Image (tube, grey):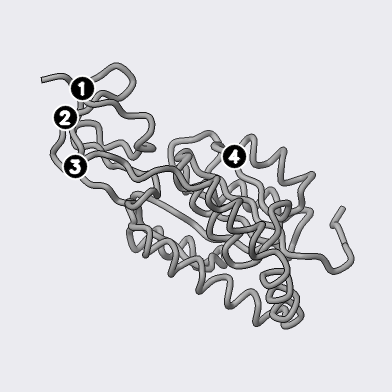
Amino acid sequence: MRITEAPHEPRFLVVDPLEGVRTYARRLMLSQGYAADSFRDCADPESALHIGREFKPDFLITDWFPKASMSGLQLYAELRRDLPSCRLALLSFEVTPAHQAQATAAGSRFLLRKPFTADELKTTLRDALAKLALERPDLIMRLQAVANRQRPQRQDLLASLTPPPPALRVGEDVIYQGRPDRVAQIVISHGELIVQLKGSGAMVPAAKLSRRAT
């Protein structure tokens, strides 16, 4: 059965295995004036399906999850059975012409290649949110009113969500999950969490790394 609801503030569901990506997306939504209760996030498609059926998101931002039992595209297809107006955006480490074609066919608002910088994620999400606001003109004045009314409280919340800048350098030896590795790139810097590791290729929150003793 398809769900028909009265107009409401847009709801966002972000699904990504990287905690840093989810945290940064939440922080960006808050900075744009969206309410905290308009955002949900989780690390895997199965949890997202459960959350999505109750939360009823207007916008699904998900990793491609190519090796999971349910891919990001499959998750979107399942959610759209009950939520035909839900919009899609995709994140993926691999972006080929075939991926682009599948994303376009599914109506994805964007397909952003990982690893990305903070500015790339910010620009891409802001463009998508701007298009969403154009589709719902009532949002423009309502979001501005929320931003003006809640600016002090929102800034306090943003500060609490922003971790200290990672005290790491490219090329530095670190330990992740008990194994040695090396920092290849700090792809979301200035407190924005994500470090790419050279040996494993993993992207992890800087807070989960420790320096390797020399």
Q: Earlier in the sequence, mark 1 or mark 2?
A: 2
Q: Is residue 81 left or right of residue 71?
A: right
The image's mark for residue 180 is 1
Residue 185 is situated, as x and y percent measured from the top left of the image, at 22, 46
Element under disc 3 = loop
Q: Residue 73: give x, y in percent of width and height.
A: 55, 51
Residue labelled with disc 2: 173
- Please name which of the two marks, 4 or 2, marks the residue nearer to the observer: 2
At horizontal 57% and vertical 67% (from top left) the residue drawn is 107
Q: In the rendering, at what x and y percent does residue 13 appear? A: 64, 51
Residue at mark 4: 42
Residue contact between numbered discs 1 and 2, judged by CB atoms under 8 Å: yes
Q: Secondary structure at mark 4?
A: strand
In this view, the mark in front (3 or 1): 3
Disc 4/disc 2 C-alpha distance (Å): 30 Å
Q: Which of the two discs, 4 and 3, sits closer to the camera? A: 3
Residue type, label 3: Arg
Q: Which residue appears at 86% of the width and 57% of the height?
A: 3
Amino acid under label 4?
Answer: Cys
Residue lying furthest left: 214
Q: Amino acid at mark 1?
A: Pro
Determine which of the numbered discs, if any, sits on residue 169 in the image: 3
Decide which of tag 3 and tag 1 comes sooner along the chain: 3
Percent position (x, y) of residue 124? 45, 68
Residue shown at the point (88%, 62%) measured from the top left: 4
